[in-house]
Image: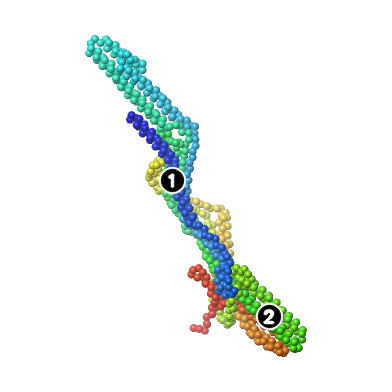
Amino acid sequence: MVRKECNKAERECLLQLSEVSEMKEKGFAMRVAVIGLFLLGGWTAGTVGQSESSLRSWEPGAYGEETISLMEAVRLTLDHSPAVQLQKEVNRFQHGLFQEASGAFDSALLADLSYDYSREGLKASTFNRLKEERDDLQEDFEEAQRNLLAGEAGLAQLRALQLDPSGATLDKDPTLQAIIDLFNAEIAAASNAEARRQLLLDRDRAIADAIQELTDLVGELTTDLADVVLDQEKLGPTPTEQERTSGLLNLSISKPTRRGFTLGPFFEYTSETDNFIGKPVDPELGGKGFEDLYRATLGFNFDTPLARGLGVKSAGAGEKAAELEFEASLLALKHVVAENIFSTALSYWDSRAAQETVAILEESARIQSELVETTRALIRADELPAAELARAQAGEADAMAALDAARRRALQARLGLSSVIGLKVESMGGAPVPADDFPTGLESSILESVDLAMLIADAVEHRDDYQSARLREESGGVLLTAARSDLKPRVDLATKAWYNALGEGSAGEPFSADVVGPSYNLKLDIEWPFANNTQEGRFVQARAGSSTRSILAADLDRVIRTSVLEVLGSLEQTVEQLLYSQEAVEHYRRSLSAEVEKYSSGAATLIDTLLTEQRLTEALLAEVAAKRQYARLLAQFGFETGRLMTESADGGYLVDRAALVKPSIQQAPDETSG
């Protein structure tokens, strides 16, 4: 009974071990899946938070007023000019390049997660060995069963003999049968009762001893048979397949630095199993006997270049160059803003000049019409021949034709101004008309006292395009320095130090192992090209790029200095031209008034009157042209000297109207002053 309970307990244990084996197959996969979901969830949360911003679009501006001031035109230009908006996108692109280059030094979590499961049949030799082991157990079972049956049969005869010593026979134990027969004969021949009683006791004792001995033997045979059966149950059927699993979780943090070296910790966890399918690990239970193997490693990586100046010059060169390019693009944006302010001012004054030209030609046409009416009156009074009417009408027709042409040019100038500003014009009359007058004249004596050297130096200093070119020149120098450093052979040192823990166990058991270490690894990586064409080519490109940028910066410096001199000289000439044209207008205006009065009284000819009016119109147009040129030169002076606008604290732009209509002139120091 006790043996049956033990066998039952062992069978329950076998069932539990089988369940543990199934859990073991899924254990590491479940752990790997949980870790993988955690990492995937973290990555997904990060990417969801970084949603792409909506794309920016440009639309032309709208302006509902009939007239527009110069500063309003400039303000609308800054808000709606496509050139400014395009340069802002260029800035964003350059910022993206800078951000991308900076990303080379971002810390990064590197994760390698894998799980392998393989299932295959057994080799014939392995299968035959396992089957032979089970066949041997079967033979042991059959032999133990035969022995047990024989023992039980002998025990039954002994018990029958014990009940009937004289009549029962023992065919299983002839020796004992002979002894019992001898006892029976002696009992029958006994001469007295005491001797007979003693012989009966000896005979019964011999039978009882034989029964006890055979009973013990049957018990042993029963135990042997139960052991063989248990061994068979433990081993189970011969396996035909085997399975192997391996899992890997590798986590590391990489931190590249701008000093050239890279460092970061790492952690690695692996698991390996190898067993027959459906079997526990214990060989007595049919398994291979290989415990699950777990390995954990925690360490630190440090990689650094030993040559090329320890990588200091080339590691951060790309990022530094991109940063300088981005800063250069910001200055380029300011220059584009200044260019558009300048272009708006030019278009504004062109449109203003076209409007004043229309007004002058309208007045000319009115005067010509009055001359026609005066001529008709003189003809009716017989003071002029009738042929003079055709001459007067021809003058009127010429004036009207010139007026129509001027109106077309004025409309074109208004549309041109709207286009430069970036306005949407949907009708011929939708383009605004300039409302500001031309700036007043500047005395030429002021220009003569300019401190030219200070003015030019200040202009170069304030020109954003030149400062942008200097930054791009510096960016090229950074790349050139890095390329020169990279001409040397590459020698890199990679080091790694770690502690590890190795343990064995079955699924469901807690992992425990001793931590051992430190271990370390040193690796030297050398690259010494014979021709070195790659680095030589990059150096040549970098040198050419740096030289190109230096040439462009130097040439721009020259152009700025020349332009300042040119615009200053043109201003001086234009001021004189404007003064002369204004004086001419006054003279022709008085002369025309006198000619018209004389013509009305018949004291002057029509030809003289027409010529005088034509000369006045030409003088007025020349005055407008001089005003237009003067206004354009003032705007150009502000542009060339970098004074058109400044950047506000909030990133906006402050435009100085005085810089558009009045030049900022540095006066030369008075040599006579103390």
SS type, badge 1: helix
93, above or below 209, in the image: below
The residue located at (44%, 31%) in the rendering is 237
Quadrant for residue 620, please give it.
bottom right
The residues bearing labels 2 and 1 have C-alpha atoms spaced at a distance of 97 Å
- Residue bearing mark 2: 365
Please tell me which residue is depicted at 34% across the width and 20% down the height of the picture.
155
Percent position (x, y) of residue 471?
53, 66
Residue 437 at x, y = what percent? 59, 78
Residue that carries the numbered disc 1 in the rendered image: 31
Q: Earlier in the sequence, mark 2 or mark 1?
A: 1
| Residue type of the residue flagged with mark 2 | Ala
Q: Is residue 651 above or below residue 495?
A: below
Q: Nearer the viewer, residue 51 or 206?
A: 51
Q: Are marks 2 and 1 in contact (CB under 8 Å)?
A: no
**Is residue 672 toward the left or the right of residue 580 in the image?**
left
Q: Which of the pair 457/156 is nearer the observer? A: 156
Mark 1 is surrounded, within 10 Å at the Cα level, by few (under 14), some (14 to 19) or many (20 or more) other residues, namely few
Callout in the foreground (2, 1): 2
Task: Give the x, y percent position of residue 478.
Answer: 52, 62
- In the image, residue 246 lies at what x, y percent? 46, 42
